[in-house]
Image (cartoon, helix red, strand yellow):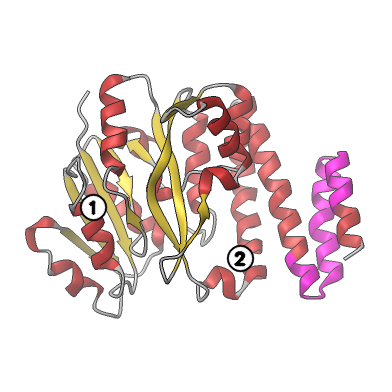
Amino acid sequence: MTTRFSIIIPAFNSAATLARAIESVLIQSWPAYEIIVVDDGSTDATAEVARQFGDMIYLIQQTNSGVSAARNAGAAVATGDWLAFLDADDTYTNDRIKLHAEWILEDATLDFLTGDYEYKDAADNLLGTSMSQHESGRMLLAKASGSLRVVIDTPTEITAFVSNHFGDTHTLSVPRSRFIELCGYPTGFKVCEDIHFLTRLVAKSSRIGVICANLGVYYIHDTSATRKNPIATQQENVRTLIDLDRLAQNFPIPVRQGVKQRMHSARYNLACALTRNKQRRAAMQAILSSLINNPSWRNLRNMLSIIKG
């Protein structure tokens, strides 16, 4: 099996951070086969920043179409065997590609790979790590028992991963052939598009490799749209998951169960956001759907907590 990695970096008005992202790929201990930057209709100097790297970068420019379309455009021209993604405001750690590539060479049965990453603020202060903050991540860390590698391969682990996954787009390594087979990231959704693709990918997989070490940095910005308008973000999250839930009828049972659990959590988060904004009636309507579709004690407790405010 070959391990030629195509790295795809979607960028929109990312002139301030794009060079840092590209440089984190260029210094990899296992060199990327190619680096593709997709300028998604930027109005700043994003394209100029990319061009400063010369032939080391393959630059695509398109009208603004959203992050999913940008990632898909990069995948369409990629020539590597494996795809990895990096948002223009995030970074890889030096061994991010190497840790996946070496394992791929040793184990051809892995369907795709992911791993841990760090959360940092704009000042580069460490805020936490992904696996330790998600139930599915803690489950895998316990299973690994100090090992660098662990495999998701049981129904319980798959359900937990779909329900509350710890990996992010920049820790994902997927065969290009499988990405194309799944038609890539869904367009038409502003939030949760990564979860939509990841869940469809899990539904086609039986062995998922996990690196229990930091593969990159996810930078959290207080000015991001998701933080400025949490209600709109949670509404869009639910809308995307409704579409995923429709597709999940044909997924394996563990994946289907994970989608249901994620949907319930999304509706509860929306209800909480509405409650904080004093939209109590809308909050009750949001949480009522979960109770009707799944009359469990958990959803009843969620409704009671919303009633109490």
Q: Residue furthest front?
A: 146
Indicate yes or no whether the magenta region holds residue 282: yes
263 relative position to 165: left or right = right
- Whole-percent x, y for residue 253 in the image: 64, 26
The quarter of the picture where the N terminus appears is top left
Number of on-image labels: 2
205 relative position to 263: left or right = left
Give the residue at x 81% y 73%.
279
Q: Does residue 57 lie above or below 157 as drawn?
A: below
The secondary element bearing badge 1 is classed as helix
The quarter of the picture where the C terminus appears is bottom right
- Mark 1 belongs to which amino acid? Val
Q: Which residues are magenta?
A: 273-302
The residue at which mark 2 appears reads as 233
The residue at which mark 1 appears reads as 25
The secondary element bearing badge 2 is classed as helix
- Mark 2 belongs to which amino acid? Thr
Q: Residue furthest bottom?
A: 44
- Whole-percent x, y for residue 18 in the image: 27, 67
- Whole-angstrom CA distance, mark 2 to mark 1, is 30 Å
Give the residue at x 73% y 47%.
264
Q: Does residue 233 lie above or below 96 as drawn?
A: below
127 relative position to 3: left or right = right
